[in-house]
Image (tube, helix red, strand yellow):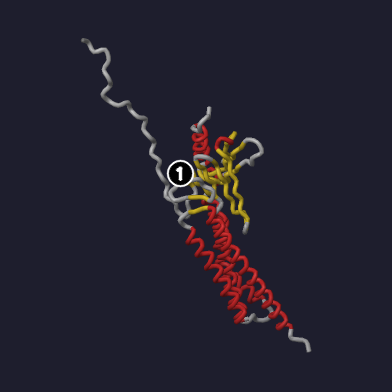
Amino acid sequence: MTPPIMTIVLTTLKVFTLVGLGLYGVFAAIMIRQEQLMAAVLEEGFEPILRLLTILHFAAAVSLLIFAIIIL
Amino acid sequence: MPTLYEAPTTKPEKKPIKAHSHTKMTPLTAFAVNPYGVRFETQEADEQVILFLRQHLIVNVPWIALTILFLLAPSILFPLILQSLPAPLPFGYVLVGTLSWYLVTAGFALFNFLHWFFNIYIVTNERVIDIDFQYLLFKRFSQAELERIQDISYTAGGIFATIFHYGNVYIQTAGALPNLEFLAVPRPDKVVEKIRNFMENLPGAI
């Protein structure tokens, strides 16, 4: 029995979305590391805020990945 | 007996010492003379930062405009895409798609801001430094000692550069050392003048 075309499309979309969000999570983690490296090169007062922003960005990426796993 | 020599009662006048005004740093500072609270990785104990430069703020306009467009896109673009689909998409997919779009837009803005923020040019009383955040996990640290600088020049061309007063500063160094380029920095004439003044005041300078 062949599954309906919509199921195949949605499954493909789900796999692409999850893989994409996973890769995006890796990118967000690398951004945190990069910010740490650059903050070591230049000491200025604004780095804690930038670090917080990169961490929040990473947290949002991971949260969305988990949310997508649950909801899709 | 007549007085042959009378010692001067007043002390000889000292040359006035030029007060160094310090510039307070903000996250958007692109030009700072004697900046407060800036230190860099290889700074020596007696080394002072004289000039701190980033690219002019105006270079951020293209990515800020794109970010605004990306933020507005879901309200215009998504209904059109959803209407054109042959079958309705489940709500979960629409929600995850919309949230992903905003997340990627935020990441795009953050990455571009980091790129601008950490691309810096520093002039100290000993050397000129160019620190580049080129792309993820790649940084470049170039420097030239002030006494190794052979020539320094600047260009400022184009409508925006003329209106907003920014340009490129080119620093030629002696021998096999790489030349340094300060791209799109504010007040390039002042930058050249500052570096020239320091080069002229170096011990052994003609």
In the displayed structure, B22 sits above or below B17; it is below
Name the spot of residue B46 as percent of width and height, x first.
47, 43
Classify 10 Å Cα crowding around label 1: few (below 14), some (14-19), many (20 and above). Answer: some
Q: Mark 1 points at which residue?
A: B33
**Residue that appears at 78% across and 89% down:** A1
Q: In this view, does B150 lie above or below B99?
A: above
Q: Residue furthest left?
A: B1
- Chain letter of the residue beneath label 1 in the structure image: B
Residue B58 rendering spot, x and y as whole percentages? 53, 51
Horizontal relation, residue B78 to residue B124: left or right: right
Instruction: Residue B147: tell me if it is visible.
Output: yes
Q: Where is residue B65 in the image (x, y as percent from the top left)?
A: 55, 59
Farthest-out residue, front: B1
Instruction: Report which quarter residue B127 is drawn in.
Output: top right
Pick whichever, B62 or B110, lies toward us.
Answer: B110
Most extreme residue toward the bottom, as rendered? A1
Q: Position of residue B47 (x, y in %)?
A: 49, 43
Q: Is mark 1 on a helix, strand or loop?
A: strand
Q: Give above or below for B181 relative to A9.
A: above
Task: Identify the residue at the far right of this view.
Answer: A1
Count of marks placed on residues: 1
Say whether residue A46 is left or right of residue B85. Answer: left
User: Could one spot residue B164 in this view of the protein?
Assistant: no
Quarter of the figure with residue B180: top right
Which quadrant of the figure contains the N terminus of chain B?
Answer: top left
Relative to the observer, which residue lies in front, B127 or A57? Answer: B127
Residue B72's place in the image compared with B116, above or below, is below
Disc 1 marks a residue whose amino acid type is Val
